[in-house]
Image (cartoon, rainbow, N blue to C red):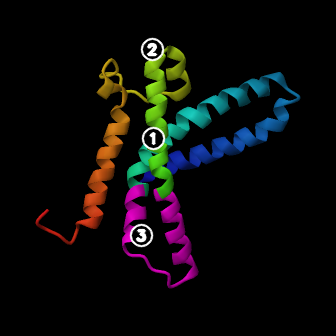
Amino acid sequence: MGSSFVYLVIYLLSIILYLLLTPLGRFFYTVNLVRNFLGQQLFMKYTLILFFSQFPPMLLASLINIYNVNFNGTLQSVSTGVSFAILAVLPFGLIATWLLIRKSRQQGGNESFSEKYGELKSDDLRPTIIGSHWKVIVTIRWAITIIIMVFLRDHYEF
């Protein structure tokens, strides 16, 4: 959990830096270069890393919160609403990533894809269909495991 928190803080500070560099980039060419590089890295590569590293804990926390829905206070109502929002967004993230990988495979998996999106595809299994979708497959496996852990926790026979 500590490394996830540190990564999230660095990610948020990078977004703040990007926003601060935006007006300065209009006046200084080198600041604009740094801003463009940060924007490329930040909004694609690092967002995907954050999505895949935080998918299991976000899903687990949201499902536990939904499993024991409680509207006894404002904070619990907000927490439940955020949980529903997270559960609505996570599948779209997986579908978008799968479509992105599919588009890359159709274009031949060029180097610009790796530069823009990072190591979204596994290096060891890249030539195969399973290898190119490995992170999505592992994330779906995590989702199935978490759903079983939360919703079937009272049924020991499973």
Picture quadrant of residue 1: bottom left
Q: Which mark is residue 137?
A: none
Residue 65 - label:
3
Q: Say which of 88 and 58 sits in front.
A: 88
Which x, y percent locates residue 99?
47, 33
| Chain-order first, disc 1 or disc 2 | 1
Three-letter residue code for mark 1:
Ile
Q: Amino acid at mark 2?
A: Gly
Q: CA distance from mark 2 to mark 3?
A: 42 Å
Dot placed on the residue nearer the N-terminal end, 2 or 3: 3
Residue labelled with disc 1: 95
> Is residue 103 found inside the magenta-colored segment of the image?
no
Which residue is painted at 50% across and 15% down in the image? 111
- Of the 4 image quadrants, the one containing the C terminus is bottom left
Q: CA distance from mark 1 to mark 2?
A: 20 Å
In the figure, is residue 77 to the left or right of 59? right
Which stretch did the figure color magenta?
A: 59-87
The location of residue 25, given as percent across then percent down, is: 82, 30
At a point 54% along the width and 76% down the height, the residue shown is 77
Q: Nearer the viewer, residue 136 or 11?
A: 136
Q: Secondary structure at mark 2?
A: loop
Give left or right: position of 41 versus 103.
right
Measured as percent of width and height from the top left, residue 40 is found at 63, 29
Q: Residue furthest left?
A: 157
- Label 2 packing within 10 angstroms: few (<14), some (14-19), many (20+): few
Classify mark 3: helix, strand or loop. Answer: helix
Would you name the residue on which mark 2 appears? 108
